[in-house]
Image (cartoon, grey):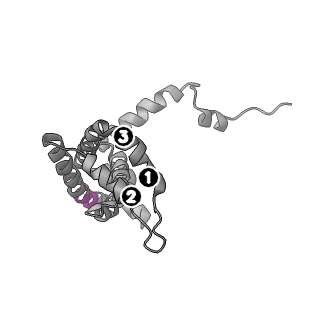
Amino acid sequence: MMNVLREHVYAAGLLLVLRIYLGWMWLTSGWHKLTGEFDSTGFLNNAINKPVLDRATNELIYPNYTAFLNHFALPNAKLINFIIPLGETLVGLGLILGALTTAAAGFGLLMNFMFLFAGTVSTNPWMILLGGIVLVAGANAGKFGADYYLLPLLRKWFHLNYRNGGHNPIAKSRMKVPAHK
């Protein structure tokens, strides 16, 4: 099943539809925040004051995340107000255009989990499922997109230094070393 998702051309076609749908959800969410007056302080205060609790023990389920929100995110709300809309917009563009698709899906999943840790369910589980499928599909998810051209270019660019005795420790470990006689 994984090989079909990662290598088959028909799977790439289905992933294109899935990718555009998911990307549109991210893009519209980020765009509305970028063009409107987005302020995360209410959301952050609510996540800190009403964290996700264990119903039996009444203890925090994600104490580290609540501490992160309290000690970093809330004091830096202006930064968060910029990063969240920009990140959502870039994830949406990456998925729609098929540019760095797996990275876009990965960052989208990261944001979805952060929203879930804060106690917001909304569409996050659905987006995690779809984003996980895109992420698992790897490069095949961007086959009908900019990744078709971008990934070979990036591979060539990053491997350029490794030719003719470059500084690639993996390639050097594969080099045949003559045995001492």
Q: Which residues are magenta?
A: 13-18
Q: Residues within 10 Å of mark 1 (few under 14, many from 20)?
A: some
In this view of the protein, can residue 156 be seen by the observer? yes
Q: Nearer the viewer, residue 100 or 90?
A: 90
Whole-percent x, y for residue 145 in the image: 25, 46
Front: mark 3 or 2? 2
The residue labelled by disc 3 is 151
Q: Nearer the viewer, residue 155 or 38?
A: 38
What's under tag 1, amino acid-wise?
A: Tyr
Element under label 1? helix
Whole-percent x, y for residue 139 in the image: 37, 50
What's under tag 2, amino acid-wise?
A: Phe
What's under tag 3, amino acid-wise?
A: Leu
The residue labelled by disc 1 is 65
Q: Residues within 10 Å of mark 3 (few under 14, many from 20)?
A: some
Does the residue at mark 2 contact the one at mark 1 (Cβ under 8 Å)?
yes
Which residue is painted at 26% across and 63% down in the image?
122
Q: Which mark is residue 117?
A: 2
Q: Which mark is residue 81?
A: none
Mark 1 or mark 3, which has the lower sequence index?
Answer: 1
Mark 3 or mark 2, which has the lower sequence index?
Answer: 2
